[in-house]
Image (cartoon, rainbow, N blue to C red):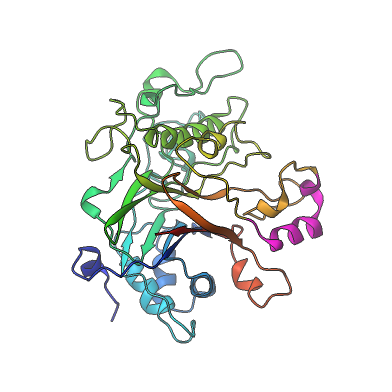
Amino acid sequence: MVLSLEACDAGEAAAAEPPETIRVATFNIAMGLEEQGAMAAALHSGNDARLQALARVLNTVRPDIVLLAEFDYDPSVDAAGLLHANYLASSETNADPIAYPHHYRPPVNTGVDSGLDLDRNGETGDPADAWGFGFFPGQYGMLVLSRFPIDKEQVRTFQALLWKDLADAQRPMNEDGSPFYPDETWAQLRLSSKSHADVPIVIGEETLHLLVSHPTPPVFDGPEDRNGARNHDELALWNHYISGHMDSWLVDDQGRTGGLSTGARFVIAGDLNADPHDGDAHPNAINQLLQHPAVDAECIPSSEGAVEAATAQGGKNEQHAGDPAHDTSDFNDEFVGNYRLDYVIPSATLSVTGCGVHWPLSSSPLHADATFSDHRLVWVDLAW
């Protein structure tokens, strides 16, 4: 029997007493699988090596709230229930099982065919012609797990927000100055490559807004830099959202308008695909969040394992300007190198007590499990 968590999510379970410190994490588990149904099969099997490693990582780091990126969205299966029953609660996987009685997974734009020729190759129906690049609907989805109740009635998603409606949208342009996307296409193009979601989590008497997204990487395009512009603007959406503005264009999928109220407690979480110093992201892409007056980005997550990896691997890492201790991803060192791409950015209304990247040294028995993905789990501790 699969453990169902729907009753807990409906608020029928008693809320856990809030501890003095809340740990919030994000982890791109790199399981945007190639075939539709592959994630469901892995969840049912109970013996997928990656999900077993994920369970051990969560058991080790023990975040109270975690966003899992590249966790394929499949509404036909109880993903959280299967993950708990077959992995997180498995005594074969964990000596000290961890439980998340509440979860949320937004539908995503990846793999959902637009019917348009978005990559301008003269054909429609390609993975690049989906609202967000993907080979099937739901690929590269997201899953939020929480020890605390999620107020699902107040969840806000921005899956359908049009790119053109973003204030100061960076419309991609060809080298000759003409628009890359024809007017008819630009009028329909969605901003979010997956989805943007404000997930309110009730902790004691307070609410923490978990702002989750997974913007497109600023590569795999041409001189028009359409993915670089989209990455910047997907981050710009959160910039506007946390600024306390009631912008009329900022309309969620539920028809509600405007951003967060001033003074709200929030954490921006996700693989944001933008390094503040290196790579192909626009210069101000991530800094528009890290330097926003409403956030506290003073605690920069770091690890000894990242330094060890950059030193041992060399290659492009030797050309990077950023501190390798802050890297959260491990890519091909001949062409890319390691970047800081994954973030948990708390609001200035929260008190940060610590932060880090779960990247153990290669000599650690925890190393193999922590590095099954090309990203690492990033966490922040908040006094509550």
- Vertical relation: 258 (above or below) 373: above
Which quadrant would residue 377 be assigned to in this image?
A: bottom right
Q: Which residue sits at x=58%, y=37%? A: 218
Report the residue that reaches farthest toward the left.
12
Q: Which residue sits at x=29%, y=29%? A: 246
Give percent across and percent down for residue 102: 31, 65
Q: Nearer the viewer, residue 96 or 374?
A: 96
Extent of the magenta region: 302-318
Which quadrant is the C terminus positioned in? bottom left
Which quadrant would residue 5 be assigned to in this image?
A: bottom left
- Is 316 contained in the magenta span? yes
- Vertical relation: 69 (above or below) 282: below
Q: Nearer the viewer, residue 121 or 232?
A: 232
Q: Which residue sits at x=29%, y=55%? A: 206
Give percent across and percent down for residue 295: 47, 41
Compared across the picture, whether 102 is left or right of 91 comes to: left
Report the residue that reaches farthest toward the top.
177
Q: Nearer the viewer, residue 208 or 213?
A: 208
Which quadrant is the N terminus positioned in? bottom left
- Vertical relation: 115 (above or below) 165: below
Count of numbered labels shown in the rendering: 0
Compared across the picture, whether 58 is left or right of 211 comes to: right
Give percent across and percent down for residue 231: 51, 36
Give percent across and percent down for residue 180: 51, 22
- Is 346 contained in the magenta span? no
